[in-house]
Amino acid sequence: MPRIDGRANDEPRPTTITPGYFSFAEGSALIEVGNTKVACAASVEDRVPGFLRGSGQGWVTAEYSMLPRATLTRTSREVNKGKVGGRTQEIQRLIGRSLRAAVDLKALGEISITVDCDVLQADGGTRTASITGAYVALYQAMVALKGSGMIKTMPLKSGIAAISAGVVKGHHFLDLCYQEDFDADVDFNVVMTDQGALVEVQGTAEGDPFSRQALDALIDLADKGTSYLFKVQQQAIATFQ
């Protein structure tokens, strides 16, 4: 079955990461995954949430939003609805969990870093692109902290990247665009470290249940895809090394 953009089944979308995208944030990046574009900005605060005060431990969290015309039709801003939607909450919690998996929070000390991920254009995989781009923004912020003397060592334990994989009309596809995601019988989002460990796996059968063999095949695809993303990340963060 040919893919919409002519890619091989196991081929990720072309991805670029532009570090230092914002002038004022301690760390930032623009990630472009095919037609999906996400701007990520890391902000540093010399304090932690109340539940961590006095613990000597830092905190990393994330917020996620989508511009009204990031999609084919306009989506109202959530601020006008008076609350953050369930999908937004779920995605930003996923981004935060994924980033914390890469950080030694004790080594960070009582410092908070918030990474804002704003979707400029959405063509599938906005949450996975956000995680991959957010790591570069986080890395830059850590370099800034070390350079200022606020931390003595880099508290990052590993790289973090994420990608989707799914089953579309019986075919296993890596890195689904929007239409492929819409048509998928099985849809996975996989977050991994650069050491090959799994951080989180989100998988759903849209119709019939899927087999253990399909699960393994999709994770293998994601492993291949994140290997590509880690190379793109390394090129981006080399600017700060």
Image: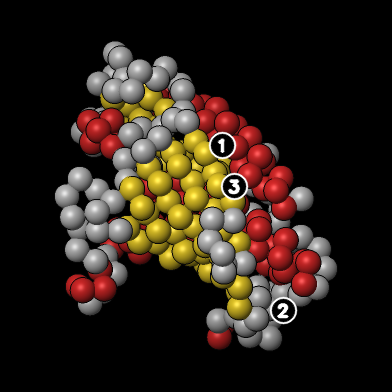
Q: Residue at x 51, y 27 (%)?
A: 220
The residue that label 3 is drawn on is: 160
Number of numbered callouts drawn: 3
Placement of 221 over or under 53, stated as above or below: above
Crowding at dot 2, Cα within 10 Å, few <14 / some 14-19 / many 20+, comes out as some
38 or 200, which is in the foreground? 38
Report which residue position mark 2 lands on: 56
Residue at screen point 65% across, 56% down:
139
Disc number placed over residue 229 in the picture, else none = 1
- x, y percent for residue 15: 49, 36
- Measure the C-alpha gap from mark 3 to mark 2: 24 Å
Q: Residue at x 72, y 61 (%)?
A: 143
Q: Is 29 placed left or right of 32 in the picture?
A: right
Q: Does label 3 or label 2 sit earlier along the sequence? A: 2
Element assignment for label 3: strand
Q: Nearer the viewer, mark 3 or mark 2?
A: 3
Which circle marks residue 36 in the picture?
A: none
Q: Earlier in the sequence, mark 2 or mark 1?
A: 2
Residue 202 visible? The answer is no
Three-letter amino acid code at disc 3? Ile
Q: Where residue 36 appears, x then y in whole percent?
A: 37, 42
Q: Nearer the viewer, residue 43 or 226?
A: 43
Q: Describe residue 28's horizontal placement relative to residue 173 as left or right.
A: right
At label 1, which amino acid type do we have? Leu
